[in-house]
Amino acid sequence: MSVSDVIYPNQPLVEVVFEIRFPGDVRIECERHLFWEKIKEDYPNILVPRPNPEQAVALMPYRFRSKDQSMTVLVSLNTFAVSTTVYPGYKEFSKEVLRLYEIFGSLYKLEKLNRVGWRYVNVIQFVRENRTIPLSNFLTLGFKVPESIPEEFINLNLVFESEHKGASVITRLETIESTTSVVGSKEALLLDFDYGKVPSDDEELVFPKVPEYLDMAHSKTRQLFEEFITEDYRQYLKGDVI
Amino acid sequence: MSVARDNVFDDLYDRGWKVVKQYPSLRGIEGQQEVPDIMRVPLKEFTSEGRFLRSDKPVEIIITNEDGIFFASSESLNIEAEGDTISESIEDFSQHVFYFYSYYTGKDASEVMGNAIRLKELYENHFQLI
C-alpha cells in the first residue's frame, strides 16, 4: 500500500473535489434532466444556482446532492465536478467519480477539455501557544522573514500558485475561526490545495483520459499534503495518540 | 487592517493595475469553511509554572463549550479541565497533567491498583520532564 492509499482516522479533510471543464455545450444545459434521471436515485436533491450579478447563470452549476448530503455532483454547460464532504479514501471516491463520469460521457459527446482540477480542503484545528499559532507543530512550511520579525505568527493569510510539471497548484493557508463560538474563538488553519492542469502546446487534455488525470491529480496533491505536515502531526492523523 | 488600505487599492486600480486572479476548482459547499463545534487538537508539550513536560505521542484533547465555559478533556488521561477561554482550559489541563504526572510517577507500583496502574504506566512510559 502506498502512502496515497492510506486513510488517516484523524484526517483533517473537510472537502475533496474533482472537476473537469470543457468547451461549452448547450445540450448539457438543455438536456440536464437526462443526466439527473440516471443518478437521481443516489442524488435526489437538486440545488439550483443562486443569481449572482457577476456571473452568467448558464455558467453556474446545478448541484445534485446525495441523500446524506455528503456528495455533490455539479453540472453546468462547461463543467462537471464531484465533491464530497465525507472523504472515504481515494479508492472509494475515485470509483464513484468514474461511475458518474461514465454516465456523463455516455450522454454528452465530449472530446477536448479545458481544465482538470482536484481540490483538497483541510481544516487543522489548533490552540494558541503564547497567543501565537503553533505552526511548526503541524506544518513544515517555513517563511524567510527579516530578523526583526519573530517567526511566531498571530494570524496567517497566504496564497501562492506553483508550477508542477505541466500542472499548477494553488495553495492557500489561512487562519479561520468559528463564527458561532462565544468567548475565545475556536480556531483552525485552512490548508487548501487546488491542483489544476490545462492544455499546453505539448499536451492537450481529452475526455477519454480522465481516469489518468484523476490519478495524477490525486497523487500530486496527496504528495504535497504529506510533505507539508510534520511527523508529529502525521502521528496524530494516524491515530497514534494518548 | 488599515482603513486606508481599500482606498490605496482603488488608486492602484484607477492607475491600470489589477489583481492576478486564480481560478479555483468549484466546490460543492457554499460559503466559508466552518470550524466544527467540537474541537480535537493534538498536544505534545505541556507547561506549568515554568516547567515543561513532553509526551512521545500526541495527547488528543477534546474541547467543548457549555454555557460559555470551555472544557478540555482527555478520556485516556482521565482529565477534564475548564476555563473561560480555550487558552485557560488548556492551562488548566496542563496543570492537571503535571499534577497527575507527579502523583503517579511518585507512587510505588505496589501502591496502585485498577485504572491507576494504567495511568502510572502511561505517565512513566510516555511523558518526560524537559
Image (cartoon, rainbow, N blue to C red):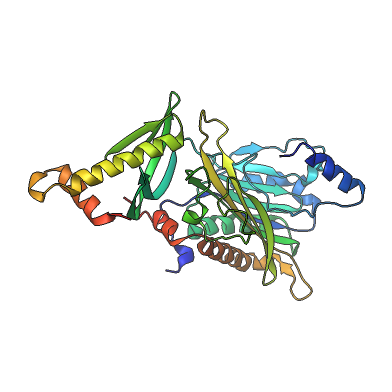
Residue A211 sits in which quadrant?
bottom right
Residue B82 at x, y percent in the picture: 37, 32
Residue A219 sits in which quadrant?
bottom right
Number of numbered markers: 0
Q: Is residue A165 left or right of residue B67?
A: right
Q: Is residue A190 visible?
A: yes
Q: B106 or A7, which lies in front?
A: B106
- Which residue is situated farthest in the bottom direction here? A202
Residue at the (42%, 43%) spot, across then down: B40
Residue A175 at x, y percent in the picture: 59, 45
Q: Is residue A8 visible?
A: no
Residue at the (68%, 49%) spot, across then down: B26
Residue A185 at x, y percent in the picture: 52, 34
Q: B101 or A112, which lies in front?
A: B101
Q: Is residue A2 left or right of residue B57?
A: right
Q: B71 or A72, which lies in front?
A: B71
Q: B100 or A33, which lies in front?
A: B100
